[in-house]
Amino acid sequence: MKKALIVIDVQNEYFEGGAFVLWNGEQTLENIKKAILAAQAAGAPVILVRHAIKGETPFFGETTKGRQIRDDILAMVPDATPIIKYNADVFYETDLDQVLQDLGVDEVILCGMMTHNCVLFSALSRDIEKYNPKVIPEACTTVNEIIHMLALQGLATRVPFVSVEEAF
C-alpha cells in the first residue's frame, strides 16, 4: 500500500499570538513534526492542508498572518503546495482526491487541527473511505482535552488509530 500523510490546518492562528490558541498545541506540533519525518523517511508524500475563510475576517481572513501554515512546517515540506479548503472536510470542493490518485495513494494517515472539527469530518468523509484512513491521536488537538477525547471516542468506532511510530 502507498501511504500519504495529510497534515490538517497547522496554521499560525492556533498557536501563541494567534486568534484561537489550542490546548496542547506545542506538544501536538512536535508529534506532527515526528509524523512528517516518519513519512518522509518511508518515502510517503506529505500533503499540507490549510483552512481559509473567504473575505476579510479576523479569523483565517484572506490577509491575516494566522491563515498561513506555520513556517516550521513549511520548511519541513518545502515542495508542498497546500490544499486550501473552506470547509471542515479536506475533500469537500478541493482537488485532494485527484492529488492522491495522481500519487497512487491508497492509504492516508491524518493529523492536525482541530480534532472535533476538521480531523473528524475529514476522517469520516465519504471521499476518504477508499483511502483506508487512519488517525494519529497524539498528533491532533483541539480546544481542550475533554473535547479532544470526546471527538476521538466518537471517531474510534469508525476509523483506526495509529501512533506516530506505527503510521509508516
Image (cartoon, rainbow, N blue to C red):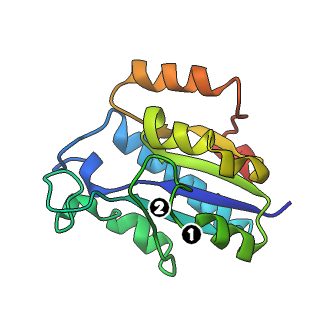
Q: CA distance from mark 2 to mark 1?
A: 11 Å
Question: Image quarter for residue 25?
Answer: top left
Q: Position of residue 164 (x, y in %)?
A: 64, 45
Say which amino acid is labelled 2: Val
**Residue bearing the label numbered 1:** 95
Above or below, 53 against 29 in this view is below
* Image spot of residue 13 (x, y percent): 25, 51
Give SS at disc 2: strand
Question: Could you tell me which quadrant the C terminus lies in?
Answer: bottom right
- Please state which of residues 14 and 89 is positioned toward the viewer in this rendering: 89
Answer with left or right where residue 148 lies relative to residue 61: right
Q: What residue sits 70% from the left and 34% below the top?
A: 159
Q: At 32% from the left edge and 59% from the top edge, which residue is drawn?
A: 52
Residues at discs 2 and 1 in contact (Cβ within 8 Å) = no
For residue 64, side relative to residue 132 (left or right): left
Position in image of residue 97 (x %, y %): 65, 64
In this rendering, the answer to whether 44 lies above or below 26 is: below
Name the one closer to the observer, 17 or 159: 159
Lateral position of residue 127 relative to residue 54, left or right: right
Crowding at mark 1 (Cα within 10 Å: few <14, some 14-19, many 20+): few
Q: In front of the other: label 2 or label 1?
A: 1
Residue 6 x/y as whole percent: 58, 57
Secondary structure beneath label 1: loop
Quadrant in the picture for the N terminus: bottom right
Q: Amino acid at mark 1?
A: Asp
Mark 2 is surrounded, within 10 Å at the Cα level, by few (under 14), some (14 to 19) or many (20 or more) other residues, namely many
Up/down of 121 relative to 116, above or below: below
Farthest bottom residue in view: 79
- Which is nearer the N-term, disc 2 or disc 1? 2
Which residue is under mark 2? 49
Q: Which quadrant would residue 103 be assigned to in this image?
A: bottom right
